Amino acid sequence: MKTQESTDKLLAQAFARLDPIAFGVAVGTLSGVGLFLATAILLIKGGETVGQNLRLLAQYFPGYRVTWPGAFVGLGYGFLAGYVAGWLFAVVRNAVLWLYLLKVKMKAASATFRGFFDNL
């Protein structure tokens, strides 16, 4: 019984669960700040046509423009899109990991029973 508890504890440490909210906030923050900085750098750089390629994001993020107010709109949209992506990734990763660990435990239990019946 003691080995089962230590094995479970070791597996829990090795395959720690990701908190979907925390991971979503982290990815959302990085995405939002990244889009804000990309827009700000293009605006500071200036030029005749500013951010031709970045301007295409307006197709997905209504209200986004390569302007200073648009940089703040992009910050919000980037955070929202990053949060959803991070949350979804954490949920799927936790589910896949749970299924994998369940399979490993079932395989170990099966091997234990097989060994027991082989010795009868």
Image (cartoon, rainbow, N blue to C red):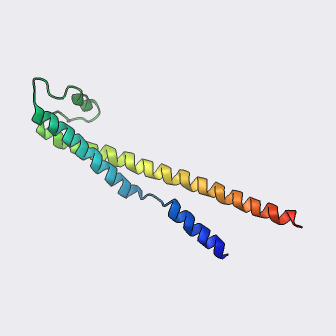
Please determine whether, in this image, residue 89 is positioned above or below residue 116: above
Residue at position x 20%, y 42% in the image = 36
Name the quadrant of the C terminus.
Answer: bottom right
Outermost residue toward the right in this view? 120
**Picture quadrant where residue 31 is located:** top left
- Rendering coords of residue 9 (x, y %): 56, 69
- Residue 108's place in the image compared with 67, above or below, is below
Residue for point 26% across, 36% down: 61
Q: Is residue 88 left or right of residue 72?
A: right
Residue 101, given in percent of the width and then of the height, sits at: 60, 57
Task: Residue 54: name its quadrant.
Answer: top left
Q: Position of residue 47 (x, y in %)?
A: 10, 26
Point 70% across, 60% down: residue: 108
- Please state which of residues 110 and 57 is positioned toward the viewer in this rendering: 110
Q: How many marks?
A: 0
Q: Residue at x 49, y 49 (%)?
A: 92
Q: In the image, residue 78 lies at what x, y percent?
A: 27, 43
For residue 65, side relative to residue 85 (left or right): left
